[in-house]
């Protein structure tokens, strides 16, 4: 689909909402998580200074279930990785900052504008963010050696976002929270593992019933993608 790179945020968000309703509950059920236990939204999500429509889920499930769900979502949607985070874990080692906007003012345009301004204020803040409602959340994610991908220590990370919020108009967001979170990526290297082997392993292996169920769901997802490509002119 050569034209999908230029697709509008509105079209991407509409498709994401369609998938949220038609596919996500099936994936959730396949890994044993009741759809009613998930609160999922289509929200702006940022990566490397670009904002896209993304699916963000909240749920009170254990870590093992969360990782299985992440692997299942990554497998069906062919994602490089899915971020799993737990904000109530006292042993969390990843620093986070929540930037809160006035009610009903954090849309994709505003999120992207803040994202760009943050990186211009302090290089390294343009790596990524997630959003829920009117909260834009930045994680100072580290590699296996504990080195932040942003290149910033936690103090500089917070200072940069604080400076950005203080000068961001007209919304006037505030730093509402900061602290430590348990965050990790569940992923698959599609260049080395073209069949999603890393996800498959996390789900119990190629012969596991859940993987076979997800293969069928992936077929449904592919049909939605094909229909959306025709509808929005992505081909």
Image (cartoon, rainbow, N blue to C red):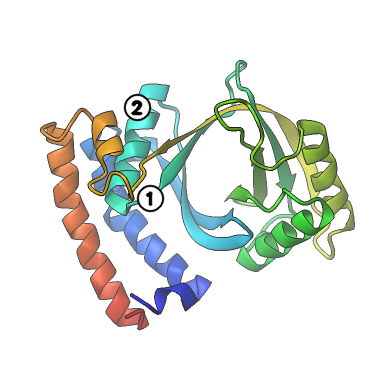
The residue that appears at 48% across and 77% down in the rendered structure is: 6
Occupied quadrant, residue 114: bottom right
x then y, percent, for residue 69? 34, 36
Q: Residue 200 in the image: x percent, y percent?
A: 24, 36
15 relative to 197, above or below: below
Answer with mark 1 or mark 2, whichever residue precedes in sequence.
2
Whether tag 1 and tag 2 are in contact, CB under 8 A, the answer is no
142, above or below 74, in the image:
above
The disc placed on residue 61 is: none
Mark 1 to mark 2: distance in Å? 18 Å
Q: In this rendering, would 189 be left or right of 180?
A: left
* Residue at position x 74%, y 33% in the image: 178
Q: Secondary structure at mark 1?
A: loop
| Quadrant in the picture for the N terminus | bottom left
The local crowd at label 2, few if under 14, some if 14 to 19, many if 20 or more residues have their Cα within 10 Å, is: some
Residue, far front = 192
Which class describes the residues within 10 Å of circle 1: few (<14), some (14-19), or many (20+)? some
- Relative placement, left or right, of 148 versus 13 is right
Can you tell which of label 1 and label 2 is closer to the viewer?
1
Left or right side of 81 for 182: right
On the image, numbered disc 2 is attached to which residue?
A: 65
Please give the residue where the numbered disc 1 appears in the rendered image: 79
Instruction: Kindly tell me whether residue 62 is visible in this rendering.
Output: no
Residue 158, given in percent of the width and then of the height, sits at: 80, 38
Question: Does residue 4 sit above or below 149 in this rendering?
Answer: below
Q: Is residue 68 left or right of residue 158?
A: left
Q: Residue at x 31, y 76 (%)?
A: 229
Element under label 2? helix
């Amino acid at each position: 689909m050569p034209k999908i790179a230029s697709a509008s945020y509105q079209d991407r968000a509409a498709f994401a909402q369609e998938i949220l309703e038609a596919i996500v509950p099936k994936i959730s059920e396949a890994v044993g998580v009741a759809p009613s236990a998930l609160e999922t939204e289509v929200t702006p999500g940022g990566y490397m200074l670009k904002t896209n429509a993304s699916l963000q889920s909240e749920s009170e499930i254990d870590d093992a279930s969360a990782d299985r769900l992440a692997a299942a979502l990554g497998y069906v949607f062919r994602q490089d990785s899915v971020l799993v985070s737990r904000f109530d874990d006292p042993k969390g080692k990843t620093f986070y900052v929540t930037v809160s906007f006035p009610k009903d003012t954090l849309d994709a345009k505003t999120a992207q504008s803040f994202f760009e301004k943050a990186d211009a204020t302090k290089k390294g803040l343009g790596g990524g963010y997630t959003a829920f409602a009117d909260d834009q959340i930045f994680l100072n994610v580290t590699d296996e050696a504990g080195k932040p991908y942003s290149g910033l220590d936690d103090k500089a990370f917070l200072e940069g976002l604080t400076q950005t919020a203080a000068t961001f108009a007209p919304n006037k967001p505030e730093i509402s929270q900061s602290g430590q979170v348990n965050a990790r990526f569940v992923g698959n290297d599609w260049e080395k593992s073209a069949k999603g082997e890393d996800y498959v392993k996390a789900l119990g292996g190629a012969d596991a019933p859940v993987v076979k169920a997800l293969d069928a769901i992936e077929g449904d997802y592919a049909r939605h993608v094909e229909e959306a490509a025709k509808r929005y002119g992505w081909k």
